[in-house]
Image: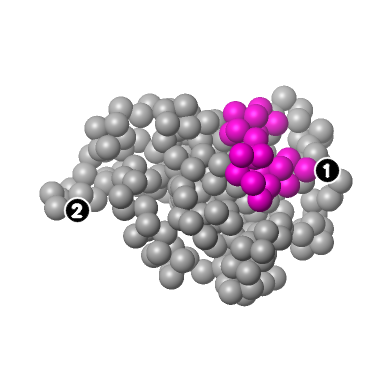
Amino acid sequence: QMRKWTSLDHPNVLPFLGYQGKDLPVPLFSWYKNGNISQYLKAHPSIDRLELLSQVGSGLSFLHSESIVHGNIKPTNVIIADDGRPMLMDFKMAPDLRMVELNMTMADSGRENVGYMSPELIEEGNYTEASDVYAFASLLLEIMSGQPPYHKLSYVQTLVQITEQKKPSPDDHPDLAASSRLWRLMARCWNTRPDKRPKIEEVHNSVRPRGCFLRLV
């Protein structure tokens, strides 16, 4: 798995420098002064958010083309390079560790992170390309509206909403019109049936710049 990781080459995927330790290797990455995407947007509020998200979608599309499921999409795992380029980090390369990681996420993540988890991921622990698409839509929502999914609810209430297959409400994100193409795209990505969600390539094409912001909102 480590060898495959080192072979990945994409401008929107954080380069893997190597690892430290033998029994439980710890991956090594470069440090970037801009921090994660949330920190970057606080410091640069006028940045084109849709352009950043389009680049994140490009990185995720690349991972899926390499048969790699990210498994942990959230703002803290989108690092901004010194040139302002977003890069995905902390994707899951070892299937046998995923259930341990899921249990740790459930125990420690808090409301903001659990809102990125699909119903089937919470109930069955299934990390798939479809669960990545679900999480990418949640990233879209938080970055474009400034608030994470279910931000008015507690951790437990959020879990209940997701497991009862209730999608985030437009009423909680008034800056994004419920009738917008962006909201309709996110709703498709949050489909309770994983096989009914669009592929990341389609989602990426829908949020690519080329004036699409006006079409989406």
Quarter that holds the N terminus: top left
Residue at 21% x, 44% y is 19
Q: Which residue is mark 1?
A: 180
Crowding at mark 2 (Cα within 10 Å: few <14, some 14-19, many 20+): few
Task: Examine the structure image and report whether residue 114 is included in the region drawn in magenta.
Answer: no
Task: Examine the structure image and report whether residue 190 is included in the region drawn in magenta.
Answer: yes
> As drawn, is 115 to the left or to the right of 108?
right
Q: Which residue is mark 2?
A: 24
Crowding at mark 1 (Cα within 10 Å: few <14, some 14-19, many 20+): few
The image quadrant of residue 173 is: bottom right
Q: Position of residue 84 (x, y in %)?
A: 52, 38
Q: Position of residue 188 (x, y in %)?
A: 71, 42
Point out the residue furthest to the right here. Answer: 179
Above-or-below relation of 32 to 169: above
Above-or-below relation of 154 to 194: below
Above-or-below relation of 169 to 129: below
Question: 201 or 58: nearer the eye?
Answer: 201
Residue stretch rendered in magenta on the structure: 184-206
Element on which disc 1 rests: loop
* Dot 1 or dot 2, earlier in sequence: 2
Quarter that holds the C terminus: top right
The rendered magenta stretch, by its main secondary structure, is classed as helix
